Image (tube, rainbow, N blue to C red):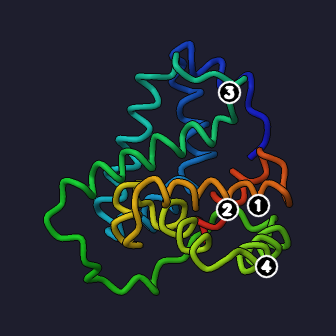
Amino acid sequence: MKDNTLLIEQFQNRDEAALSKLYDSYSGAIYGVIIRMCRNEEAAQEILQETFMKAWNKSHLYDASKGKFYTWLYRIARNTTLNFLRKQDKLIQTEDLSVYKDEGITENQELHTELKGVLAKLEPHHQKAIQLVYFNGLTHKEAHEEMGVPLGTFKSYVRQAVEKLRGHYAKESLILICILELLT
């Protein structure tokens, strides 16, 4: 996703045309994140709309110096999806998701392959911690219970794993890589 600085500025100034263009640019990738997390097409469409409405209503909170627009939008989508999932009584997948194909970012395939190799070099408990938090969308509290370790220990696992990954990638690249993993 290219640099959309002017478009984002217009969006923050409540320009509906800018909102439409940003939606066209980012909705596919954001939808891919949401559908992987909630595994329900109807709910994913609703969450996508809610994500963009929240972004529109809170556009003044976006600060380019703190991160890329996609990352900000991704966090809104992830949190909205997690809130949706927490409200659900049934968290078991009942649909065959093999029919869904993500049409997200494909140009970074080599980087994605390299990430899988780096993740495979982590210790098993670090791999599991990263998978639960970044790829399965669990909170630290949910993930530490899943692993059966104390919360502080789990947070240490995540921190240690991220530090090891940072040894291979710049901070900004790590965020992009985690997002790419979610999309594939």
Q: Which residue is mark 4?
A: 117
Q: Earlier in the sequence, mark 1 or mark 4?
A: 4
Q: Earlier in the sequence, mark 1 or mark 3?
A: 3
Q: Amino acid at mark 2?
A: Ala
Badge 2, how many Cα within 10 Å: few under 14, some, many 20+?
A: many
Q: Amino acid at mark 3?
A: Lys
Distance between the alpha carbons at the discs numbered 4 and 2 = 14 Å
Q: Earlier in the sequence, mark 4 or mark 3?
A: 3
**Circles 2 and 1: CB atoms closer than 8 Å:** yes
Badge 4, how many Cα within 10 Å: few under 14, some, many 20+?
A: few
- The mark closer to the camera, 4 or 2, is 2
In which quadrant of the rendered view does residue 183 lie?
bottom right
Q: Amino acid at mark 1?
A: Lys
Q: Which residue is mark 1?
A: 164
Residue 91 spot, x, y in % from top left: 24, 71
Distance between the alpha carbons at the discs numbered 1 and 4 = 13 Å
Distance between the alpha carbons at the discs numbered 2 and 3 = 23 Å
Mark 2 lies on a secondary structure that is helix
- The mark closer to the camera, 2 or 3, is 2
- The mark closer to the camera, 4 or 3, is 4
